[in-house]
């Protein structure tokens, strides 16, 4: 198999950079607003992230509204 291809013959898949545990200021242990968190995630090169605030979905919903 040629380097840079996968078994189906197409281009090789790139690994995604993902963080599945981030908090916004909707959690008592974090200070970043959802917009700041999105900016930081992009600057860090993340492809995907999950907002996992304590006992609320408000931060996740706010982040989704800003950047679905």
Image: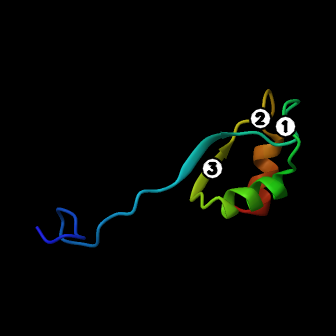
Q: How is the image coloured?
A: rainbow
Q: Is residue 55 left or right of residue 25?
A: left
Number of numbered discs overlaid on the protein picture: 3
Q: Secondary structure at mark 1?
A: loop
Where is residue 2? Give x, y as percent. Answer: 14, 72
Element type at mark 3: strand
Q: Are marks 3 and 2 in contact (CB under 8 Å)?
A: no
* Residue at image mark 1: 30
Q: Compared with residue 42, is residue 20 higher up or lower down, i.e. above or below?
A: above
Q: Residue at x 86, y 47 (%)?
A: 32
Q: Residue at x 41, y 57 (%)?
A: 15
**Residue 68: image location, x then y, percent:** 69, 61
Q: Tell me what residue is drawn at x 67 percent, y 63 percent.
A: 42
Front residue of 5/66: it is 5
State whether residue 32 is above or below residue 10: above
Q: Is mark 3 in CB contact (under 8 Å) with mark 1?
A: no
Residue located 25% across and 70% down the image: 4
Residue that carries the numbered disc 2 in the rendered image: 53
> Which is nearer the eye, 63 or 24?
24
**Residue position for label 3:** 49
The answer to which quarter of the image holds residue 47 is bottom right
SS assignment at label 2 = loop
| Furthest-top residue in this view | 55
Give x and y (percent) for residue 56: 81, 33
| Cα separation between marks 3 and 2 | 13 Å
Crowding at dot 3, Cα within 10 Å, few <14 / some 14-19 / many 20+, comes out as some
Q: Quadrant of the N terminus?
A: bottom left
Crowd tier of the residue under label 2, counting other residues whose Cα lies within 10 Å: few below 14, some 14–19, many 20 or above: many
């Amino acid at each position: 198999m040629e380097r840079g291809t996968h078994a189906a013959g197409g281009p090789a898949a790139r690994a995604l950079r993902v963080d599945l545990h981030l908090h916004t200021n909707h959690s008592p242990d974090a200070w970043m607003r959802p917009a700041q968190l999105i900016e930081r995630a992009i600057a860090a090169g993340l492809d995907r992230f999950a907002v996992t605030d304590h006992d609320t979905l408000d931060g996740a919903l706010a982040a989704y509204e800003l950047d679905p």
